[in-house]
Image: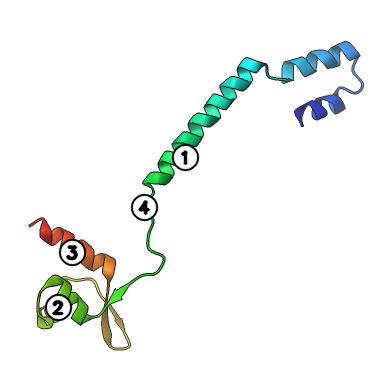
Amino acid sequence: MVSRLVLKITFFVSQEEKERVEEENEPDDDALKEMLININGKLDQLLALQETTIHLPLKLEYLDIVDVSKLLKVEQKTIYNWVWAGKIPHLKANGRLLFLREEIDEMLRKREKW
């Protein structure tokens, strides 16, 4: 593509000048090798980044109060008290209390550190 552009621009220039411009714009073998090594390094970085990327679940999982009380090993009354006190993240949908599974799992992890 570059050589085509150079040819079009240098159409009215002498043949010697055109050849000089083409030689300056074309990379030599060492430069090509260096470019390939650079590209290979960047690909390795991208692959390493892809391996460390955290993939979130595609569908959020909601739990009801019965499930949460079983997971946290407390009575349902305790869960209601925590909701009222604002100690547990929750949602209300159609009069039901719902909890995101991720948030409950996070509570469990924190609780295990006690």
| Element assignment for label 2 | helix
Who comes first in sequence, dot 2 or dot 4? 4
Per the image, the residue denoted by label 2 is 79
Expressed as whole percent of the image width and height from the top left, the position of residue 14 reads 91, 14
Of residues 26 and 13, the one drawn nearer to the viewer in this rendering:
26
Taking the image as shown, residue 55 lies to the left or right of residue 68, namely: right
Residue at 61 percent across and 15 percent down: it is: 30
Task: Kindly identify which residue carries mark 4.
Answer: 54
Q: Nearer the viewer, residue 8 or 3?
A: 3
Q: Alpha-carbon neighbours of circle 1 within 10 Å: few (<14), some, or many (≥20)?
A: few
| Left/right of residue 41 with respect to residue 70 in the rendered view | right
* Above/below status of 22 relative to 62: above
Considering every residue shown, the one lying at the far left of the view is: 114
Q: Amino acid at mark 4?
A: Ile
State which mark lies toward you, 1 or 2: 1
Residue 94, located in which quarter of the rendered image?
bottom left
For marks 3 and 4, the one nearer the N-term is 4
Q: Residues within 10 Å of mark 4 (few under 14, many from 20)?
A: few
Quarter of the figure with the N terminus = top right
As drawn, the residue found furthest toward the top would be: 16
Label placed on residue 107: 3
In front: label 2 or label 4:
4
As helix, strand or loop, the secondary structure at mark 1 comes to helix
Along the polypeptide, which appears first: circle 1 or circle 4?
Answer: 1
State the residue at coordinates (45%, 40%): 47
* Residue 104: numbered disc: none
Mark 2 belongs to which amino acid?
Answer: Ile
Give the label, 3 or 4, closer to the camera: 4
Q: Nearer the viewer, mark 1 or mark 3?
A: 1
The residue tagged 1 is 46
